[in-house]
């Protein structure tokens, strides 16, 4: 299945009884595998998790830590805008040029790079020396 189809399909499984806002995310890993995630809400509202976090967790659980492309979809008027936390989570595993596609159910799409999604991202350079690199 394509990245887009995977994101649309997994969105159907979102558990969003409180917001009624289902989100699907799919990431393409460097190894060429597609990982899917949906939002999973909780009666204790802050315990809910975003679709992007689920897709990233699936990728890392499978032993991969680099992603080459991202697709996120929700039933929003404008293509869904990932929350700030998810932008930082995606930036951890993607590069500045990683392609990110945001979509809604009506066919609207916005394509951007990771650097455009999270300009001025907090990164390892801010930590300075003495901190472990990820590689
Ligand atoms: N949500 C996501 O899963 N990803 C986004 O990019 C935006 C927001 C979820 C969180 C919550 O379950 C619902 O959408 C409403 O905020």
Image (cartoon, helix red, strand yellow):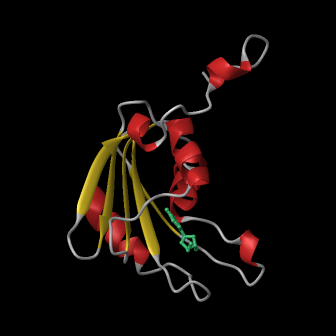
| In the image: residue 42, left or right of residue 105 | right
19 or 25: nearer the eye?
A: 19
Query: Is the residue 112 above or below the residue 40 in the image?
Result: above
Q: Nearer the viewer, residue 107 or 133?
A: 107
Q: Residue 86: percent from the left, percent from the top?
A: 56, 53
- Percent of width and height locating residue 91: 52, 38
Q: Quadrant of the N terminus?
A: bottom left
Corner quadrant of residue 128 = top right
At horizontal 74% and vertical 70% (from top left) the residue drawn is 46
Vertical order, 18 against 9 (above or below): below
From the viewer's perspective, is residue 10 above or below residue 25?
A: below
- Residue ID at (22%, 66%): 108
Q: Indicate left or right for 79 with 89 as reference.
A: left
Task: Tell me what residue is drawn at x 46 percent, y 36 percent.
Answer: 94
Q: Quadrant of residue 81?
A: bottom left
Name the quadrant where ligand 1 sits. bottom right
Task: Identify which residue, 62 or 35, lies in the foreground.
Answer: 35
> Which residue is painted at 79% across and 12% down in the image?
130
Task: Farthest residue to the top: give it.
Answer: 129
Residue 65 visible from this viewpoint:
no
Residue 76 percent coordinates (x, y)? 37, 75
């Amino acid at each position: 299945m394509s990245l887009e189809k995977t994101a649309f399909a997994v969105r159907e499984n979102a558990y969003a009884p409180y917001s009624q806002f289902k989100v699907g995310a799919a990431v393409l890993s460097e190894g060429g595998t597609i990982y899917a995630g949906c939002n999973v809400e909780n009666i204790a509202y802050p315990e809910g998790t975003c679709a992007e976090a689920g897709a990233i967790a699936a990728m890392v659980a499978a032993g991969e830590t680099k992603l080459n492309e991202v697709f996120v979809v929700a039933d929003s008027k404008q293509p869904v805008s990932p929350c700030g936390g998810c932008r930082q989570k995606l930036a951890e595993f993607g590069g500045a040029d990683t392609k990110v596609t945001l979509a809604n159910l009506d066919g609207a799409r916005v394509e951007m790079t990771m650097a455009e999604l999270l300009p001025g991202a907090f990164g390892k350079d801010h930590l300075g020396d003495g901190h472990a690199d990820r590689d």
